[in-house]
Image (tube, grey):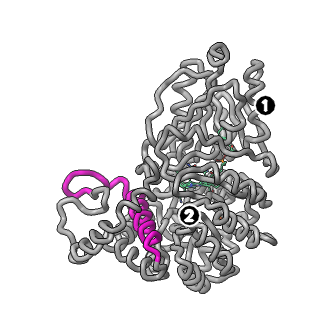
Amino acid sequence: MEMTEKKKRKLLLINPINQYRLGFSNDPSTSYMPLGLGIIAALTPDHWEVELIDESFELCTFRPADMVGFTAFTANAFRAYELAAMFRSQGVHTVMGGIHASMMPEEVVNYVDTTVSGEAELIWPRVIKDFEEGRIQKLYQGGITPVDKIPFVRREIYKKYPYVYDLIQISRGCPMGCDFCSVTKMCGSKYRERPVEEVLDELEQTDRPLLFIVDDHLINTNKGAEERAIRLFRGMVERKINKLWFGQAAMNFADNDEVLHWAAKSGCTLILLGIEAEKPEALKDARKRLNLKRGVDYYQEAFRKIHKHGIAVLGAMIFGMESDNEQDLYNRMEFCLKSGIDAMQTSIMTPLPGTDLFFRLRDQKKIDLCNYPEDWKHYHFKEATMGTNHMTREELQHTMRNIWMKLYKKENIRKMMFRTLRKTRNFKAAYWVYGTNHNYGRIVLEDLLGDQPGDLNRNLEWIGSKRSWYIRLTNPVLTIIYAIWWKYMVRRFTGRY
Ligand code: B12
Ligand code: SF4
């Protein structure tokens, strides 16, 4: 036994984090487990020891290994290259996969020993075998995985870190092909839906009280999707998979009352809706067909239906579409404030590599931050990398700073919390919304955070400034609510750790 243990090869799986802008990794409550690496771990044979290093929690330093595997979003790609250089200088074989490697394999091959483009399920066993046999190649194409070949995520690798959420993926692919999005390019245009029973079995292996279903569309647009969703949510209730969860969906999430009923019953508390814009011209820019088809007038009706079931809405909005002018940005801000969305994800349009938007704007020489790979570190959606047809990059950035200061102002997010409570009559939803808006505020205003007078503290208050009457008035109310619910909430929202 001891002999076999000694002979095991070592695979380090690394989630590199952009050190220039931490983004979601700024806070443990928004540091999510890298699911792709859990799949790689599941596909790796037993005679390999696998260890995860997640830079959301610790900086990666050199440690001996036979092979290092990086995953990376575009915003983290440059950091992956820095780390790869460190491991390569010590003779460790480096491999990179994930979305950036899939969209930019021709770049990635210059910085790591082996690049894996596309999904890993069908190709990773071969990569490992080739490595063991001394004939590993520079580039592998993974392609699209048939749904029955997707393994359960090997969750034990996440145990070393205090992730607040469990993550699960129940389907891949999207036929919509929006202009700015890489999902159709990465995962193909057909929905690949895992069998409901299998998803429920995997869910039973998760043990955190909070869950994030990462699918881009919780309810796909194909035939039978609603019925399938109901089976899933009902199955969660029947199997007593007791979670508070959030997911991502398109506007069709609100179509069917029975779907909403079972979603809520199974613990759905917050749903991210890809709204993107309230202006049809901007939706046309982005080829956001689904929203155009419904019409922007439908949005509020959808929010109302969702609220009725006690679920809060996280509106994903994009600012800086090609046709946007300054007034459009302020109109979008007003929409965020008044439309009835509860939490606000407000991103700056960013040309992700591999998307139609990227190729078009690159050819038109409209992307300002294009000194790759260094400039990928700006591609985290909180920094303008280009202007619009009516604004320069600097004007866009400046306007966004003003808008963010208004949207994520402490008074405003507190008002939004009380509004959510009124509309959903769900305290958990209101609390989640409050935390989410706080987190987004910290992410978009990251460069203003500090502990000196004039800085913004982590509670989104200006250090040295007097508190407004609204904050002073509502503080006692919140104190009472916390006193009653605090223990329960801490247990729910921080997991068992
Ligand atoms: C979950 C998710 C998140 C989570 C992150 C969870 C996490 N820790 O990874 C959260 C909510 C934090 C998030 C945030 C953002 N996200 Co996001 N997110 C996703 C989503 C919906 C699913 C990713 C996922 O878990 N998939 C399931 C796993 C199994 O798939 P996978 O990671 O691709 O892994 C497979 C392969 O890539 C490969 N692989 C992966 N890693 C490795 C490593 C090796 C060594 C090998 C060999 C293979 C390999 O094998 C796996 C199995 O086939 C994708 C969309 C999508 N469908 O992919 C967008 C996506 C990844 N996100 C995206 C974006 C843009 C963002 C944001 C910037 C959005 C915003 N407006 O703020 C932020 C910023 C994130 C940041 N750190 O900078 C883009 C990224 C594009 C890019 N080129 O970088 C995507 C593709 C969506 C899109 N619209 O295009 N996101
Ligand atoms: S934005 Fe949503 S609907 Fe559009 S391609 Fe991406 S995943 Fe599909």
**Camera-side residue of 405 and 410:** 410
What mark, if any, has residue 246 been given in the picture? Answer: 2
Q: Which residue is mark 1?
A: 126
Position of residue 340 in the picture relative to residue 359 (left or right): left
- Which of the two residues, 5 or 412, is positioned nearer the viewer here? 5
From the viewer's perspective, tell me whether residue 492 is left or right of residue 482. Answer: right
**Quadrant in which residue 360 is drawn:** bottom right
- Residue visible at 77% across and 24% down in the picture: 130
C-alpha separation, residue under disc 1 versus residue under disc 2? 36 Å
Q: Position of residue 423 (x, y in %)?
A: 47, 82
What segment carries the magenta color? 426-455
* Residue 428 inside the magenta-drawn segment: yes
Percent across and percent down for residue 238 are 67, 65
Percent position of residue 189, x then y: 78, 60
Residue 486 in which image quadrant: bottom left
- Does the magenta segment cover residue 309? no
Amino acid on which the number 1 mark rests in the picture = Arg
Residue 493 at x, y percent in the picture: 44, 58
Q: Main secondary structure of the magenta part?
A: helix
Would residue 488 appear left or right of 469 to someone viewing this image?
Answer: right
